[in-house]
């Protein structure tokens, strides 16, 4: 049994007290005088490609490197995201991710599955995705699902057969999201009607909002219940983040982090592409944004800097992604929940991280 104390964020609000952890669960919360540090539910990143030089497209070791790096920044559960690639590359990447899922190592965030970002996306809105898009194909999807647990997939709803493909995905328990798309608003609404649940990195790599051509962004702001957004201040202006949060009730934060996260300036891999870290951004050679160098603790601090209180920021990086995935015992601190915890100091810097009751990171 272990204990964690501080100002604890519970479903009912902040409680000064002490958590008792037994095995992998929160056993009890006891009110007590405690220090000023904050205890939050572990962060949940549903879209992350890599970090600390590790790219999940490179295989098991790249995936493990990313899981260890992001654990040190408060992420306790994650979906590792692939990029569009030839099928043999995708299958190899999925095999590596599956190995990390089934045999988590010391110091790692738990990898809960795959976010398949492509290949069923628009060739006209690849962004930083390598140029290997395919039209939606259930047979190809069946092949890929045989290699790892695919939980989320990004697709373009305007592609041939996409609506039938969305219905197929829902029947197999996969959450389809709209992204990397040139869809009209009408095509987007058809995707929602077919069963799309969310939008991938809202605003980025999709048709934007015009008052006479509302596009994907307009349809999302008008009709979506869920969407992910990259809160690095570079992909989306903070004012646009605030606008989306007013329109979409369950907007949650992702990093879209790539291998360059946590690394010095230089060249790194993203699937078959070389990307370049400059300052706090990651780019293709032509200047196109290519994922991010964001971590979830930085995203939390950004939200607070942009005017959100800490409890609301924590909801966007933890509770809401857990609810989107249907993980009832994650994203919350209460008796019986998984003991996935992040402890922050008064400057919101990470002090400790617990995954399933085990401390996987301690500062210093």
Image (tube, grey):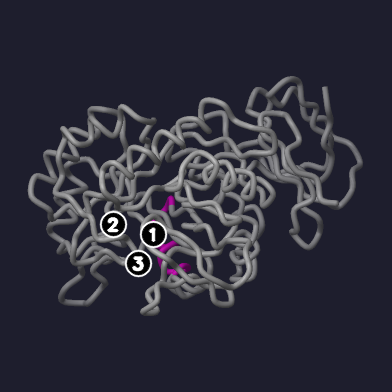
Q: Is residue 198 magenta?
A: no
Quarter of the view holding residue 324: top left
Relative placement, left or right, of 169 versus 22 is left
Q: Earlier in the sequence, mark 3 or mark 2?
A: 2
The local secondary structure at tag 2 comes to loop
The local secondary structure at tag 3 comes to loop
Q: CA distance from mark 2 to mark 1?
A: 7 Å
Reading the image, the residue beneath label 1 is 201
Seen in the picture, residue 34 relative to 185 is either above or below; the reply is above
Label 3 Cα neighbours within 10 Å, binned few <14 / some 14-19 / many ≥20: many
Rendered location of residue 23, percent (x, y): 73, 20
Q: What is the magenta range?
A: 241-250
Rendered location of residue 273, percent (x, y): 38, 62
Could you tell me if the residues under marks 2 and 1 are in contact, i.e. CB atoms within 8 Å?
A: yes
x 46%, y 75%: residue: 237
Relative placement, left or right, of 38 versus 333 is right
x 46%, y 68%: residue: 241
> Residue 179 shows which numbered tag?
2
């Amino acid at each position: 049994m272990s204990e964690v104390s501080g100002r604890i964020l519970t479903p009912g609000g902040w409680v000064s007290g002490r958590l008792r952890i037994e095995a992998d669960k929160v056993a009890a919360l006891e009110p007590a005088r405690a220090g000023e540090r904050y205890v939050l539910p572990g962060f949940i990143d549903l879209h992350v490609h890599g970090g600390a030089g590790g790219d999940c497209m490179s295989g098991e070791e790249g995936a493990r490197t990313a899981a260890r790096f992001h654990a040190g920044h408060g992420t306790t559960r994650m979906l590792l995201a692939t990029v569009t690639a030839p099928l043999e590359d995708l299958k190899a990447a999925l095999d590596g991710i599956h190995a990390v899922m089934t045999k988590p190592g010391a110091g790692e965030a738990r990898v809960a599955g795959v976010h398949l970002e492509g290949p069923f996306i628009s060739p006209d809105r690849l962004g930083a995705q390598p140029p290997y898009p395919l039209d939606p194909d259930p047979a190809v999807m069946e092949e890929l699902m045989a290699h790892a647990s695919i939980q989320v997939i990004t697709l373009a709803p305007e592609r041939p057969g996409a609506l039938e493909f969305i219905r197929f995905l829902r029947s197999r328990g996969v959450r389809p999201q709209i992204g990397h798309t040139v869809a009209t608003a009408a095509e987007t609404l058809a995707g929602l009607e077919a069963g799309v649940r969310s939008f991938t990195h809202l605003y980025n790599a999709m048709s934007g909002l015009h008052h006479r051509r509302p596009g994907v962004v307009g349809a999302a702001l008008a009709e979506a219940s869920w969407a992910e957004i990259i809160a690095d201040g570079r992909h989306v202006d903070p004012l646009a983040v605030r606008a989306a949060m007013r329109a979409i009730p369950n907007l949650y934060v992702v990093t879209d982090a790539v291998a360059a996260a946590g690394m010095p300036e230089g060249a790194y891999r993203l699937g078959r592409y070389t990307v370049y870290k400059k300052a706090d951004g990651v780019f293709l050679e032509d200047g196109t944004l290519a994922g991010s160098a964001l971590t979830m603790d930085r995203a939390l601090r950004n939200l607070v800097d942009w005017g959100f209180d800490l409890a609301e920021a924590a909801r966007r990086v933890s509770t809401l992604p857990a609810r989107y995935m249907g993980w009832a015992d994650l994203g919350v601190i209460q008796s019986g929940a998984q003991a996935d915890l992040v402890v922050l100091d008064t400057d919101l810097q990470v002090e400790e991280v617990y995954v399933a009751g085990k401390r996987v990171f301690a500062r210093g």
